[in-house]
Amino acid sequence: MKKICLIGGMLQGFEVCYLAQKAGYEVHLIDKKKQVLIKDLVEHFYCFDITIYPSKLIDISKNVDAIIPVTENFDTIKYLHEIVSNIHCPILFDFDSYYISRDKAVSKSFFAKINVPTPINRPYSPPYFVKPITGSSSVGAFMTYDKKKIPNLDTDFIVEEYIEGNVISLEVIGNGNTYYVGKETKVHINESNDCYMISTFSNNKTFRKIAHNIASNLKLKGIMDVEAIQNKRNLKIIEIDARFPSQTPIVVYNSSGINLLEMLLEAFSLEEITNFECISTENQCTLEHLMKGKNNSLVHIGEQKLKNALTCKLYHADETIEIFEYMGSNKIYTLISKGVNEKSLCANRECGLNMLKYN
């Protein structure tokens, strides 16, 4: 049995735990907080700060097959980069690509050099889309028609044209030489620009070529998420994140059978990654976050709301639906629905919704 160690116990960690369970891996978790979201989903939990007790991390690295940072704490990632030579197993993370991707101004400059299409900077007319230079794109991002708000923003924000269309996502895994492009998914966004649902999406050759081009120019050695806006006229890249993403890999797994965690481990041990070409599948999957309201009603909530939960557990699982329940002040669930086609997906999803409504 392979053993992996995660640094960070929140949303990205949930994703890796899910895929690790499907692959039959044992998961070890390190987090400096005693109570973290995925604590009850892992086999071993260690509560300490790696920047204060690096020797503990080094000892753990002797007994696992790989370490995966799944934290958004930049100081933790920088420190891990500093001590990487002392670690006794691979760290499945591309630090150089991450430093480019976490700064949206730097990454946009990189896109321009390799002719990647992106939204126009500082457009003359509204609507404008404003987003922080660092951090998750949903936190602090907003759309406005008021040009007067734009000059008051400091250098911590990027102002772009607002483009209507589907938000679509792709994962790319690389070993620095060859690159595997995963399966497209659609990202459903609420009014707060937070993702409340992920669904399968049709293959897009243009998007796949752009994603591969970005990875090859980065010489990516790890996993990267690429997001774009697609409408009838064009496709534009809005951001990349060179880290293990949340939400989308679960939908990729259940619609295509491709476990991106397994692929990531293989990428660090193979000279060439096979199956680069587009995945063809008719299987369907949706992942959505729901909160129970008045009269047993269910409402969608954004992913960021899950950060307030104390822990989570598996509520129900079968071949058609899986439900995770989050412990906290409100009843919050993640519903994963599966089907061999759109019709069966809708029927299975309805069963899952009814299970939550009337239980």
Image: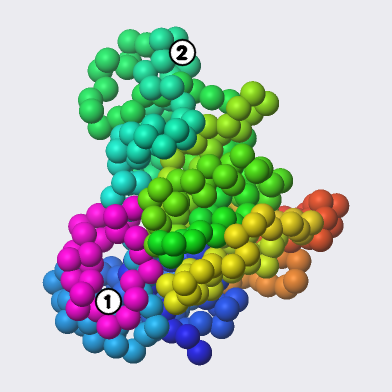
Q: Residue at position x 41%, y 37% from top?
A: 114
Q: Amino acid at mark 1?
A: Cys
Q: Residue at position x 53%, y 42% from top?
A: 210
Residue 197 relative to residue 114: left or right: right
Residue 180 location in percent, x, y?
A: 55, 60
Query: Mark 2: few, some, or many residues within 10 Å (few <14, many ≥20)?
Result: some
- Say which quarter of the image contains residue 311: bottom left
Q: Which range is magenta?
A: 72-97
Marks 1/2: CA–CA distance:
48 Å
Residue 124 relative to residue 155: left or right: right
Q: In the rendered structure, does residue 215 fall within the stretch colored magenta? A: no
Q: Which residue is mark 2?
A: 126
Residue 169 visible in rendering: no
* Element assignment for label 1: strand
Q: Amino acid at mark 2?
A: Pro
Disc with the residue nearer the chain's start (1 vs 2)? 1
Q: Which residue is mark 1?
A: 47
Residue 193 relative to residue 105: left or right: right
- Say which quarter of the image contains residue 278: bottom right
* Foreground disc of the pair 1, 2: 2
* Element assignment for label 2: loop
Indicate the quadrant containing the C terminus: top left, top right, bottom left or bottom right: bottom right
Q: Residue at position x 54%, y 24% from top?
A: 163
Vertical position of residue 26 compared to residue 224: above or below: below
Vertical position of residue 93 compared to residue 101: above or below: below
